[in-house]
Image: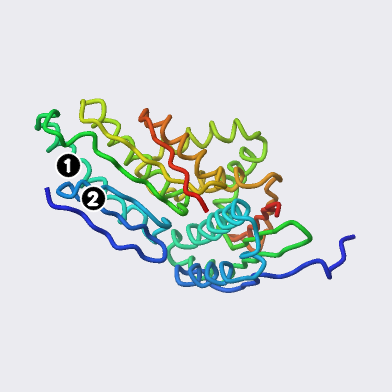
Amino acid sequence: MEKLIIEPTLNSPRVILDPEKKIFEFSGESRPENVKNFFMPVLEWLEDFSDELSEQDSTNGKFPLEFHFNFEYFNSTSAKFILDIFKTLSKLNSRGKEVEVKWHYEEDDEDMLEVGKEMSRMARLPFDYVKIQN
Amino acid sequence: MIPMSGTKTIIDYKGSVSHRTIERLLDKLRSAKEFQEMKKPTRKRLYSAFVESVDNIYKYAASRGKRSRLAKRESAVSVRKQDDQYMITAGNLILNDDVDELKFKLERVSQLDRENLKTLYEDIINREAGQEDQGAGLGLVTMALKTEHKIKYSFTPVDSTHSFFEIQIIING
């Protein structure tokens, strides 16, 4: 599976989806001009990746896959697509391909922690909450 | 009466709202001394409420074909600090046809407490996930979750097809 790398801009996050290096990461600010155009390729990539993984043996040392979410900020329109990402990961998880979500938040950013908890509950996917010390 | 001397204007913009304008306004907000001196959680809440209210203007203006040119031209955005409170106002021309729907969404949001807002948030995000949120339902709920005050709003008829819509959000500093 080809990796997907999206460089960040002022209003869109950095995305690294690199199966070879086992790096899966979202970071920065998300309020792209066209949210759908930004997130659809990401969701499609994850679906394809998911299909590919489902055909593989889970005991080959590849798992769990660590997905890091380190958002500084995302707007409400992005939130929907981010939830879709978690729903895709949740499906993968329930098929026995273990996924670990690391939800990073700054130590005084209770809102970011809270929205992470909501996302985790809605997607039925456990998160690890990683506090960033200021 | 609150003395005017206690009010500091951080942003006061009138004109068309494009994506470029949004970037410029956000830049101005981020570089304001008052903004940088805010505690981080409050600063993020103000930032979020500001983005959602400006996005709301853009969405309404952008989805309206020919008429959008008029709507874009007539927008007004401001951020003011008064004592320990930050007040965001965002106003734009909307079609009279959209007044009822927007009023319904605002009334719904203003009647709910925090727990019920979160339930509504969940309902909308799951219902519309994967689609553009042209109706700004989730944006309004997000704004309401960022403020401890009621969202104020008004609709002023302009002509037979347009009304001026204004929204006001207060964030505690």
Q: Residue furthest front?
A: A133
User: In the image, is A130 to the left or to the right of B143?
Assistant: left
Q: Which residue carries the number 1 mark?
A: A49
Residue occupied by mark 2: A17
Residue A35 in which image quadrant: bottom left
Labels in figure, total: 2
Residue B5 shown left or right of residue B93 in the figure: right
The kind of residue tagged 1 is Phe
Which x, y percent locates residue A111?
Answer: 55, 44
**What is the quadrant of residue A123 in the picture?**
top left
Q: Earlier in the sequence, mark 1 or mark 2?
A: 2
Question: Residue A94, percent across and down?
Answer: 25, 25
Element on which disc 2 rests = strand
Image vertical order of residue A78 relative to residue A127, above or below: below
Q: Can you tell which quarter of the image residue B36 is in? A: bottom right
Q: CA distance from mark 1 to mark 2?
A: 10 Å
Q: Amino acid at mark 2?
A: Leu
* Residue A124 locus on image (x, y percent): 37, 28
Q: Quick check: marks 1 and 2 in contact, CB under 8 Å?
A: yes
Q: What is the chain identity of the residue bearing mark 1?
A: A
Q: Is residue A35 above or below residue B66?
A: above
- Chain holding disc 2: A
Secondary structure at badge 1 equals helix
Residue lying at 62% horizontally and 62% vertically, measured from the top left: B91
